Image (cartoon, rainbow, N blue to C red):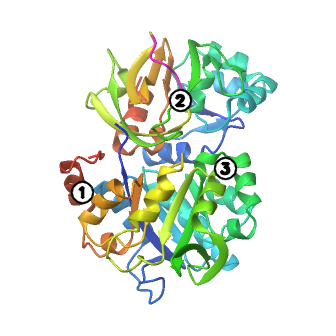
Amino acid sequence: MKIAIIKYNAGNVASVMYALDRIGMKYSWTDEEEEIRSADKVIFPGVGEASTAMAYLREKQLDRLIPTLKQPVLATCIGMQLLCKHSEENDTTCMGVFDVEIKRFKSTELKIPHVGWNSIEAQGENKLMKGLSASEYVYFVHSYYAPVNPYTTAICDYVQPFSAMLQKDNFYAAQFHAEISGLAGQNIIENFLAL
Amino acid sequence: MLTKRIIPCLDIKEGRTVKGTNFVDLRDAGDPVELGALYAKEGADELVFLDITATVDNRKTLVNLVREVARHVNIPFTVGGGISSIEDVSALLNAGADKVSINSSAVRRPELIDELALQFGSQCIIVAIDTRQVNGLDWVHTHGGRRITEIKTIPWAKEVESRGAGEILLTSMDTDGTKAGFANVLTAEISSHSSIPIIASGGAGSMEHFYDVFTEGKADAGLAASIFHFKEIEILALKNYLANKGIPMRI
């Protein structure tokens, strides 16, 4: 199986690569259109800020490539937010695979960012949580969130219920860091690779 | 519900795990990779690796160690000790660390926090604060707690947050190594005025101490070394104890 991890300027992807190493999978880290298109699975990870990441994706024309991919795509953290329509983070227009507005958490009682392990509840048929409990703990670090919407496949509650996972056709997305979310995270990645 | 985190800390010297009392009298107690993976399996929520004798010579050893840890550990881990530049951070993150912790270098040049947060994002920048009471006031200390500064702890905690720290690792040198409980009053004072998570460290000796630091101390995470290291407290037993007392835990 050919796995492509999309190379761009959002954060550190080493932990994604090591997560794939741990389950014995080979991958390439690339921003080449041909290599990404021909992969069996595409992972779009990232930690970072939305407008800087989108500017880079536009420069590399990856913003046009990614929404047209046909194979299963797994987007995590900022990757998930960039697949939505718009982010409040520096008023950024994103790729629009999911018709969803990314908003900033607002709370006077709870700390922002949302950092740490929180439970997620699967909604309907969640293929990536197959074999897992309906509720699992995964690791989050974020200040912006996708509200619950028709594409939501898992819900987490912090300040209010929000989308921990989204799915539309071949696009799968997770707000949390599956790559460092223990066994639950590893199972989610394995389920994605088994699609 | 967002859980409180239990974080074992592994002090590293020349690639090996050690732990002393009040940061002296080190005792070799194992292979950090094996110990880290074991902690992860036993339910640790995160790991911290502190290179306590960080020197230029040791940098390569540390980077190699980080790479090995990343290959074997499936929970977030932080690396600290002797980090003073963008290049240091870049090498550790590229080797697979999820976060880095800076201490003396931030005291020396606070702008480093802004620069690292801008370059790598706040989420991976932890500022460690070593604090000790002198004449009833809390002062920041550096160099493993040996050297007092002219900086008061509470304003420093506010400053590191405003400069872009993603979390604060607060170690009380008064309680560290005593096993008499965390510095709950100071931890609560800092946590209740801060929007970023506070990891409390120093003084854990019993399960109850963790309960106290999460309730009275308002900490988001509790860190300890020797009690886990020498199996005085098992992580899973601690998490079950806390969960039974109503503290949200990942079990």
- Quarter assignment of residue A130: top left
Q: CA distance from mark 2 to mark 1?
A: 32 Å
Instruction: Please say if A96 is above or below B128.
Output: above
Q: In terms of secondary structure, where does tag 2 sit?
A: loop
* Chain identity of mark 2: A
Q: Are marks 2 and 3 on the same chain?
A: no
Q: Nearer the viewer, residue A51 or B179?
A: B179
Q: Are marks 1 and 3 in contact (CB under 8 Å)?
A: no
* Residue B154 in view of the camera: yes
Image quarter in which the N terminus of chain B is found: top left
Q: For marks 2 and 3, give the CA distance.
A: 18 Å
Q: Which residue is outermost to the right?
A: A59
Going from the N terminus, do you reach mark 1 or mark 3 first? Answer: 3
Main SS of the magenta segment?
loop
Residue reaching furthest to the front: B136
Tell me if I can see residue A38 in this picture: no
Pointer 2: what residue?
A105
- To which chain does the residue with label 3 belong? B
Q: Name the kind of residue labelled 2 in the image.
A: Phe
Mark 1: secondary structure: helix
Q: Amino acid at mark 3?
A: Ser
- Amino acid type at image mark 1: Leu
- Side (left or right) of B194 relative to A92: left
Front one among A140 and B202:
B202
Q: Which residue is mark 3?
A: B162
- Within the image, what quadrant is residue A58 found in? top right
Percent position (x, y) of residue B71? 48, 55
